[in-house]
Structure formats: structure tokens, C-alpha cells
Image (cartoon, grey):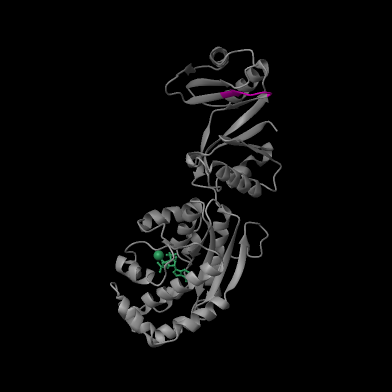
Amino acid sequence: MDKVILIKYGELSTKKGNRNFFINTLYKNISRKLVNYEVNIHKDRARMYIEFLDKDLDSIISIIDKVFGIHTYNIANIVESDDSKIQECLLEVISKEKFNTFKIDVKRSDKSFPIHSQDYNRVLASLLLKNINNISVDVHNPDLLIKVEIREGETFIYYKSYQGSGGYPVGTQPKGLLMLSGGIDSPVSGYLALKRGVVLDCVYFEAIPHTSIEARNKVISLCKKLVLYCDKINLHIVNFTPIQEEIYKNCREDYVITIMRRMMYRISERLSHKYNCHVIVNGESIGQVASQTLTSMEVINSVTNMPVIRPLACFDKLEIMDIARKIDTYDISIIPYEDCCTVFVPRHPVINPRIDRCICEEEKFDYNTLIEKAVEDVNTIVIDDSEDSEFSDIL
Ligand code: ATP
Ligand code: MG
């Protein structure tokens, strides 16, 4: 192996006492994602090193780009720590690049290497100036900043830095329950929660026959996109039909969405307890629809004491759509299948609901028994990131 990916941790490096835990989690996540590749992975407190086979570079990079906790990375050439070998390698790799100005930055951690860093900077700079036409040294703002790290036995030469995915490694926080509909917002919300290190289970409320099996498959496809950023996702599918039908039969029309959402929160809380989730995560965004005004959020949220994380609370729809495109969920989300929230939309949903009215409407049917049954009968499918997963051919 003559190349190595050098990973710098970024935000992770602000964690003092927890630093090892964060690094070890990142190490585990990277190792697991690269299990099918011939790689050697090492770590220290500042960086991680992945040695790989040249042919795998592109696919490894596309995987690494989805592992949270990486600030930047470089692809370094490895050469023996020997003056003539270093010169030969440097000239070979740099000759292929197009640039006008450069700077050499030698770091010599192997003090047995006979030439001091400053002197070696000059040696290598003259080598390039002599062999490549029309280039000059610029120590302040070079086109190419060429790093030469002389370590015991081997030297790394690199000059390009790539942006990593940022955030914290998934698994540095415990589990949250993502309310995942087939829409644009909730997958983006899930992506942002994963980026903060939160492990996710998902819950999807379906109302068959009012919603179709295709709508469910859409949610499974969205999970397949999210799972690229983590290990696996348990998707809990709740049969919401009996509750939804009771709401429409018994409750005043302008309150049906508010009450439906209160029921979803109640069920999400129960499922969180059942599956050890510490927070509920959803795709609500302030003011987006009647059920997401601040008054609605207050009234809906009041059925649970659990923390509800809304990563998109202050995002514009266009910003959300940009992220959805970036994470490749947008095209799935816009496939037009009915969601249980869109099956029966009241003409004038209440914008400023009142808690006492909700309670009064909810007393008209025995929702506790229905909720218990919904939680008991939940259907869980496990979605992992393997190509041949049972659900990989949906959509
Ligand atoms: P999205 O918000 O995902 O684009 P949406 O806009 O159709 O879908 P809203 O009516 O805005 O959904 O609902 C707000 C949030 O409530 C969603 O982002 C999602 O977290 C949750 N939610 C709505 N419907 C469902 C459902 N059928 N199953 C699970 N969660 C849901
Ligand atoms: Mg929405």
C-alpha cells in the first residue's frame, strides 16, 4: 500500500475528557463501514490513518464522506524516509498537478533523519523549481501547500485537503426516535440528528387502506438512504387506521389534525420507552402548516414530557430541500403517495388550538386502549446498509 487517507477529527477535538470515547466510536464506525475492503486503520489522538489499495480509493471516499466526525482528510503518498526516495516521489506526484505557486512544509518527527526541516524545505523547493517550468514559491498564499511529514520509517507527502462530513460520530449519543413520514422534512431531520451523533430508530404511522403499501415502501427507501450514515435502523410501523378513523368519526373537524398529532406523540413516547429512545425527533418547522404554529406545537407537545428535538424548527423549506437533494432523499420524498396526515385534510384546520378543547374532543373515544393496541402490534423491520438487504430493491 503506497497511499494513506489522513483523517482529522475537527469538532471532535474540542472534547477533552471524552476524547478517547469519540475517537474510538469514529474508529469503530469507519472500520465497520470498510469491512469489505482491504485496509489497515490506525488512530492516535490527533488523526486516523487508513491504508488502502489504490483501486478502492473512489469507493472508500464515497463511504468516508458519509461517516460523521471527520473534519477534513488528505490523501497522502507514502514513501520510505530516505532523501532520494522522498525527492523522487515528490517530483513524480507534483509534476502531475497544475499550479503556479507553492510552498513546502516539512515536519520531521523522526529526528534521526539527517537533514533539518528548514534545510529540507529548501532542498525540496529547489528540486521542484529546477524540474517544473513556470512555478515560483509563495509562502503566504500558495496554490499548493505541500506537506512532507518525515516519520520513523515512512514519509507522508500530501497537498490537497478534502472537507469531511463534520459533526460527531454516530453512537456518541444514545438513541432517539425519529418520526419519519414520506415527506421531504423528516428524513432531513433524521440526517441532522445523526450528524450530532444520535443513534436513530424510526416510527412510521400508516393508515392502510387509506394509505398504500407504496407509501410504506417510500419510507423504507428513505431509511435506506439514512442508514448510509449509520449502522442500522429499526423502523417501527404503527397501524394508525383505527385511531385515525375514531378521530374522524368523533372529533370536530377543525381539530382532527391537532388530535391526530397528539396521538402520534403519545404513541411515540410509548415506543421510546419500549425501545430505549431518549428523545423524539421530527421534521416540524415553525409555521410551516397549521399544526406547526407555536401554539399548535405547544398544545401537541403537551401530551408528553419527553424532549422533542426539531432540527428543522428554524429552517426555510428551500434550505431543507437543498439538504434533501444533497442526501439523495428528495426524489423519493416527492413521489406522490398519500400520507395519513394528508388523507383527510380539514377545510379549516385550527391554527391556535386550545388544550381544553383537545381534551374535550379526546374524551369522546377510548384512545388509551387504541394506543395500547397500536404499540403492542407494532411491526418492526430492521434496515441495514448491505446492498443485498431484503429491502434494497424497493423503488
Ligand atoms: P415531512 O415533514 O417529512 O416533509 P410532511 O410535511 O408531510 O412530511 P408534516 O405534516 O409536516 O409532514 O408533519 C410534521 C412531522 O411530523 C413530520 O416531519 C414527521 O416528523 C412527523 N410525521 C408526520 N406524518 C407522519 C407519519 N405518517 N409517520 C411518522 N411521522 C410523521
Ligand atoms: Mg413538513
* 258 versus 365 height, above or below: above
Q: Nearer the viewer, residue 259 or 16?
A: 16
Instruction: Indicate the quadrant containing the C terminus: top left, top right, bottom left or bottom right.
Output: bottom right
Is 49 contained in the magenta span?
no
Q: Where's residue 294, x and y in %?
A: 31, 65
Is 152 contained in the magenta span?
yes
Q: Quadrant of residue 391?
A: bottom right
Q: Residue at horizontal 60%, vertical 22%?
A: 109
* Side (left or right) of 276 relative to 140: right
Instruction: Indicate the quadrant containing the N terminus: top left, top right, bottom left or bottom right.
Output: top right
Q: Quadrant of residue 189?
A: bottom left
Q: Where in the image, quadrant-wise, is ligand 2 located?
A: bottom left
Q: Nearer the viewer, residue 251 or 299?
A: 299
Q: Is residue 349 visible?
A: no
* Side (left or right) of 263 relative to 232: left
Q: Residue at horizontal 28%, vertical 72%?
A: 352
Q: Where's residue 13, x and y in %?
A: 50, 39
* 198 versus 48 height, above or below: below
Looking at the image, how many numbered discs can be counted on the residues? 0
Q: Where's residue 327, x and y in %?
A: 50, 53
* Side (left or right) of 236 relative to 80: left
* 109 versus 263 height, above or below: above
Q: Where's residue 250, x and y in %?
A: 39, 87
Q: Nearer the viewer, residue 42 or 336?
A: 42
Write the start and end of the magenta stretch as one range: 148-153
Q: Is residue 114 visible?
A: yes
Q: Residue at horizontal 56%, vertical 63%?
A: 221
Outermost front residue: 17
